[in-house]
Amino acid sequence: MQVMSENRMRKIGKKRCVHSWLVRCAAAGLTAVAAAFLYGMSAGAVSASAETAPEQIGETAPATAGEIIRTPEEEIIISPAEETEAEQELETESPIDFESLRAKNPDIYSWIRIPGTVIDYPVLRSTGDQEFYLHHDADGNESVYGSIFSQNVNRKDYTDFLTVLYGHNMRDYSMFGSLKLFQESSVMQNNKYIYIYLPEITLRYEIFAAYSIEAVHPLYQFDQEDMQDHEDYLEQVEERGADVSTFDEELFETITKDSHILSLYTCNGDPDYRFVVQGVLDEPEGGWTELAIALGLREPPRKPMRLIPYIPVRD
């Protein structure tokens, strides 16, 4: 496949990234969820993975869209996400009350939501230990749930070619536990979008792949500023996607070295592998990077990352 053909280049940049219904319908609800998450999370429930507490809850097969999954804690309904007709306009006002969240914990810098799942959480970044939020909740308390977090090899404004977020694969499907459901192609087809809320803007990513991958941190293997490295990475993704049914080849054909990819990583029961769900940013006209610069979001370029030692993210 010629990743960077002219035809593919012309396919991008035609979709807007924000739906105004999000602001109208989600503002009150998401702010309430933010407060509930920060102060209502119990610390003693199930463990993060099969390796840490196999005795607590038995294995549950992946669910299809609309199936009810019963756990000792709750019933979670995985249902097709309801989408209303999009208004083609860029929304720069976030529905999340970041001022209140940051007053509680300044490490909160964005919010992730996947309609049709229970993924609706703040995203954090520690200024010190890069794995701090692997074992701490959004209040900074020790927790088997951890938090959704990133590491400092990524910009916080999501303008990198590849952004990686981490979360535990919880047995009760909380945190990134429901990502495992995307192993079913019907779930991926019915729940296509990932929303990232920043204080200045809302981003929408369309999911194009869900698969298992070796437990190697991709951000320490290539240079975010090197376009050839971008092409090499896309070739690796295409090779991986050829082996799974949960790979949207048509959407992947629109991705170029100038696109912005979001990868959600979680464990999958095998210490040598991770499960990843990937989406590509629906870019506004003119491109996301240009827009981010105009909004004052883009951080300055960093040094190449090829020589940075690999830092594992443990289960």
Image (spheres, rainbow, N blue to C red):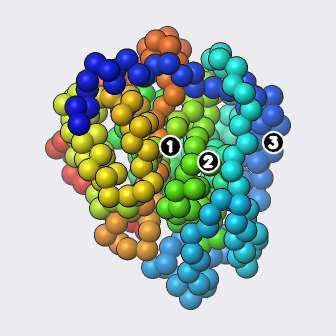
| Mark 2 and mark 1 residues within 8 Å of each other at the beta carbon | yes
The kind of residue on which mark 1 rests is Ile
Front residue of 47 and 7: 7
Percent from the top left, x then y, of residue 197?
62, 34
Q: Which quarter of the image is occupied by the C terminus?
A: bottom left
What separation in Å lies between label 3 and label 2 (alpha carbons)? 19 Å
Mark 3 or 2: the one toward you: 2
The kind of residue on which mark 3 rests is Gly
Q: Hey, which residue is sitting farthest left in the picture?
A: 307
Front residue of 181 and 57: 181
Q: Is residue 63 above or below residue 182?
A: below
List the residue tagged with mark 2.
191
Q: Which quarter of the image is occupied by the N terminus?
A: top left
The crowding category of the residue bearing disc 2, from other C-alpha atoms within 10 Å (few below 14, some 14 to 19, many at least 20), is many
Residue at position x 57%, y 43% from top? 192
Percent from the top left, x then y, of residue 69?
69, 71
Percent from the top left, x then y, of residue 241?
34, 51
Residue at position x 42%, y 49% from top? 247
The kind of residue on which mark 2 rests is Asn
Mark 2 or mark 1: which comes first in sequence? 2
List the residue tagged with mark 1.
207
- Secondary-structure class at tag 1: strand
List the residue tagged with mark 3.
29
The crowding category of the residue bearing disc 3, from other C-alpha atoms within 10 Å (few below 14, some 14 to 19, many at least 20), is few
Mark 3 or 1: the one toward you: 1
Q: Is residue 92 above or below residue 32?
A: above
Q: Is residue 273 visible?
A: yes
What separation in Å lies between label 2 and label 1 (alpha carbons)? 8 Å
